[in-house]
Amino acid sequence: MPDDKTSASADVAESLTNLGGLLESTGRYVEAKPLFVEALQLKRTSEVGGVEIAHALNNVGLVCSALGQMDEAGAVFTEALDFLKQELPSGHKDIARCINNLVREGYSSTRD
């Protein structure tokens, strides 16, 4: 059972993700990126599963892509894909979406 600190971290991560998403949706990628990165760091240190970490990584990757930071985007999407492949069945829509992000960015790091 999560303690109060873990629960608070999850709430903060969710708020950061929501604010980052709002900024991203209005094209304010430079402002959104640090919020998504902080949310990712909170999720990495909390008791969330790999799928939630992968979703946080995907947010960072999308913003990196929008900023033209293709190498970073590819590395982040690849890490997200690794988490998803560990926890979800082959062919899951989240895995497909992550592979699509990699392909769209010109990466073929869809390792088995």
Image: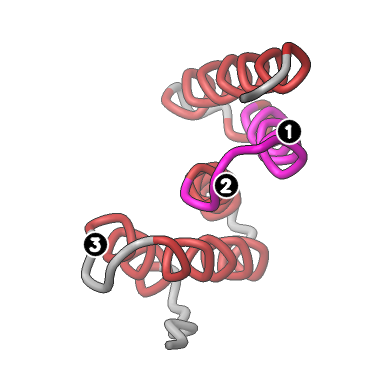
Task: Specify the principal SS of the magenta part.
Answer: helix
Label whose residue precedes the other's in the sequence (3 or 1): 1
Which residue shows up at 50% across the image and 29% down it?
24
35 is within the stretch colored magenta: yes
Query: Percent from the top left, x then y, of residue 27?
Result: 49, 29
Q: Which residue is mark 1?
A: 42
Q: Which residue is mark 2?
A: 53
112 or 77: which is nearer to us?
A: 112
CA gap, disc 3 to disc 2? 16 Å
Residue type, mark 1 in image = Leu
Residue 4 sits above or below residue 53 on the image: above
44 or 56: which is nearer to us?
A: 44
- SS label for mark 1: helix
Residue 55 sits above or below residue 106 on the image: above
10 or 2: which is nearer to us?
A: 2
Label whose residue precedes the other's in the sequence (2 or 1): 1
Name the quadrant of the N terminus: top right
Query: Percent from the top left, x then y, of residue 45?
Result: 77, 40
65 is within the stretch colored magenta: no
Residue 20 sits above or below residue 111 on the image: above
Residue type, mark 3 in image = His
Q: Which residue is mark 3?
A: 92
CA gap, disc 3 to disc 1? 25 Å
- SS label for mark 3: loop
Query: Percent from the top left, x then y, of residue 92?
Result: 24, 62
Magenta-highlighted residues? 32-51
Do the numbered discs 2 and 1 sit on residues whose CB atoms are within 8 Å? no
Which residue shows up at 73% across the image and 11% down it?
4
Mark 3: few/some/many CA within 10 Å (<14, 14-19, 20+): few
Label whose residue precedes the other's in the sequence (3 or 2): 2
Query: Percent from the top left, x then y, of residue 37?
Result: 71, 39
Residue 37 sits above or below residue 80 on the image: above
